[in-house]
């Protein structure tokens, strides 16, 4: 992260203060360095002002604090993407929801309506409890490159890119990205990128 810890908290707090309408979505992307504390089994993001000798980790952004803050933002649909080492420790017990997210026999508007009626709390990280490659200097990381490829696809012919479709773009990146849900996520929810 190129921001200080205070700037990061301030940005998240601004998202929490916004007024969201039904159907609004919040996409949060954080790229930077991460660390993991094996004693407390906690992942952290490194801020621009994080101190290396901070054993108490007070100058880091913990994944548990981030989960709590994001979960309390009054937006119905939130999708967090972390491109950082140890990002998969955002939720160690996360497992992906299986099945086919595509509806057959309904139109685009009905599909969107069905998917957007449930509270969404999903995340995607560039790896698990491990270091992840930054890529070549001046270019995106391998994870970010594939993520952008997915976002630029605009969901194909129907103009809808679902969370599960986006996962298809990053699933072959090494190390394997981690995904799942957190907080108050409701079964049947989804995060949709809709081409306008």
Image (cartoon, rainbow, N blue to C red):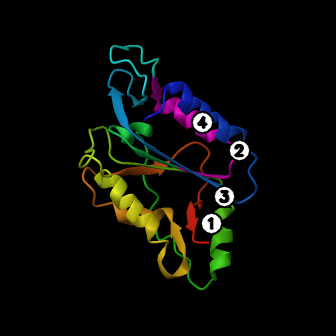
Q: Which comes before the other along the chain, label 4 or label 2?
A: 4
Q: Which residue is mark 4?
A: 11
Q: Which mark is residue 115?
A: 1
Q: Which residue is mark 3?
A: 118
Q: Residues within 10 Å of mark 4 (few under 14, many from 20)?
A: few
Q: Which comes before the other along the chain, label 2 or label 1?
A: 2
Are the residues tagged 2 and 1 within 8 Å (C-beta)?
no
Nearest-to-viewer mark from 2 and 1: 2
Q: Which residue is mark 2?
A: 74
Q: Verify whether residue 62 appears in magenta.
A: yes
Residue span colored magenta: 60-79
- SS at mark 1 in the image: helix
Q: Which mark is residue 144?
A: none
Classify residue 113 by image quadrant: bottom right
Q: Left of 148 or right of it: where is 137?
A: left
Q: Residues within 10 Å of mark 3 (few under 14, many from 20)?
A: some
Are the residues tagged 1 and 3 within 8 Å (C-beta)?
yes
Q: Which comes before the other along the chain, label 3 or label 4?
A: 4
- SS at mark 4 in the image: helix
User: Outermost residue, bottom direction?
Assistant: 105
Q: Which comes before the other along the chain, label 4 or label 1?
A: 4
Residue 78 horizontal/vertical position (percent): 59, 50
Q: Verify whether residue 80 appears in magenta.
A: no
Nearest-to-viewer mark from 3 and 2: 2
Q: Residues within 10 Å of mark 1 (few under 14, many from 20)?
A: some
Residue visible at 23% across and 49% down? 136
Nearest-to-viewer mark from 4 and 1: 4
CA gap, disc 3 to disc 4? Answer: 25 Å
Q: Which comes before the other along the chain, label 3 or label 2?
A: 2
Nearest-to-viewer mark from 3 and 4: 4
């Amino acid at each position: 992260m190129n921001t200080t810890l205070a700037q990061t908290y301030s940005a998240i707090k601004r998202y929490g203060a916004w007024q969201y309408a039904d159907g609004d979505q919040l996409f949060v992307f954080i790229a930077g360095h991460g660390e993991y504390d094996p004693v407390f089994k906690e992942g952290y993001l490194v801020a621009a002002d994080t101190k290396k000798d901070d054993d108490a980790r007070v100058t880091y952004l913990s994944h548990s604090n981030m989960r709590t803050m994001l979960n309390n933002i009054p937006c119905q649909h939130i999708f967090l993407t972390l491109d950082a080492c140890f990002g998969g420790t955002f939720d160690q017990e996360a497992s992906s929801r299986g099945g086919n997210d595509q509806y057959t026999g309904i139109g685009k508007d009905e599909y969107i309506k069905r998917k957007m009626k449930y509270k969404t709390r999903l995340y995607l990280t560039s790896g698990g409890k491990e270091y992840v490659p930054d890529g070549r200097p001046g270019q995106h990381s391998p994870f970010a490159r594939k993520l952008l490829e997915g976002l630029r696809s605009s969901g194909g012919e129907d103009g809808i890119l679902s969370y599960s479709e986006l996962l298809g773009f990053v699933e072959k990146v090494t190390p394997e990205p981690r995904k799942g849900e957190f907080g108050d996520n409701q079964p049947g929810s989804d995060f949709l990128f809709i081409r306008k």
